[in-house]
Every structure is written in structure tokens, then in C-alpha cells.
Image (spheres, rainbow, N blue to C red):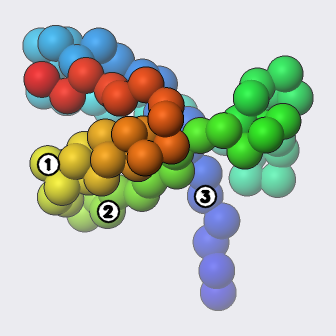
């Protein structure tokens, strides 16, 4: 059996002092649209799509994930996120 589950992750500032980001995850209906038609990511595919594994509510390999995210932004000529 396949369980369909989708989350929207709200962005936070790179200097956010929190260590628990549970409140930044919001479940969404996997069958409902999550992007506005007015967004460039919807219109032109402008965007970076990365995944990060989470085990027992703990993200795995965060530094490697952030490095991939920054590298993807750079090669797509998109703004590189502040990682420090």
C-alpha cells in the first residue's frame, strides 16, 4: 500500500536561533494544488527541487543537503540561499 503525504515547509531566516522547526512543516492535501499559477516555478519551472531524508523526526545529512541546494541555485542562476 502506498501512502501519499505532502508537506509544505515554510522558509525561515538563516540566523533563526530555534533548534526545533516542527512549526515550519504544514501538511497539505496531496491531491490539491500547492503552487499559485502566478509563481514563476509554476509558469516556467523556475526553481530548485531538493529532498532531505527525515528519520524519527530528525533530518539526515543536513549540511550535504544545504550544499546541494546552494550548488543547484548557482548553476541555475538563481539567488543562492544564505546558509550561514
Of circles 3 and 1, the one toward us is 1
Q: Which residue is mark 1?
A: 63
Q: Which residue is mark 2?
A: 53
Q: Is residue 57 above or below residue 76?
A: below
Tell me what residue is drawn at x 84 percent, y 21 percent: 38
Q: Is residue 81 above or below residue 18?
A: below
The secondary structure type at the circle numbered 2 is loop
The secondary structure type at the circle numbered 3 is loop
Q: Label 2 crowding class (10 Å Cα cut-off): few <14, some 14-19, many 20+? A: few
Q: Which residue is mark 3?
A: 5
Lateral position of residue 9 relative to residue 5, left or right: left
Q: Are marks 3 and 2 in contact (CB under 8 Å)?
A: no
Q: Are marks 2 and 1 in contact (CB under 8 Å)?
A: no
Residue 82: % across, % down = 25, 22
Tell me what residue is drawn at x 20 percent, y 28 percent: 83
Tell me what residue is drawn at x 87 percent, y 29 percent: 37
Lateral position of residue 16 relative to residue 26, left or right: left
Lateral position of residue 32 relative to residue 15, left or right: right
Amino acid at each position: 500500500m502506498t501512502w501519499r503525504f505532502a508537506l509544505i515547509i515554510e522558509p525561515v531566516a538563516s540566523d533563526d536561533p530555534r533548534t526545533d522547526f516542527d512549526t515550519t512543516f504544514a501538511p497539505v492535501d496531496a491531491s490539491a494544488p500547492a503552487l499559485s499559477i502566478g509563481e514563476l516555478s509554476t509558469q516556467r519551472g523556475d526553481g530548485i527541487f531538493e529532498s532531505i531524508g527525515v528519520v524519527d523526526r530528525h533530518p539526515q545529512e543536513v549540511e550535504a543537503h544545504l550544499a546541494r541546494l546552494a550548488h543547484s541555485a548557482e548553476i541555475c542562476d538563481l539567488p543562492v540561499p544564505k546558509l550561514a
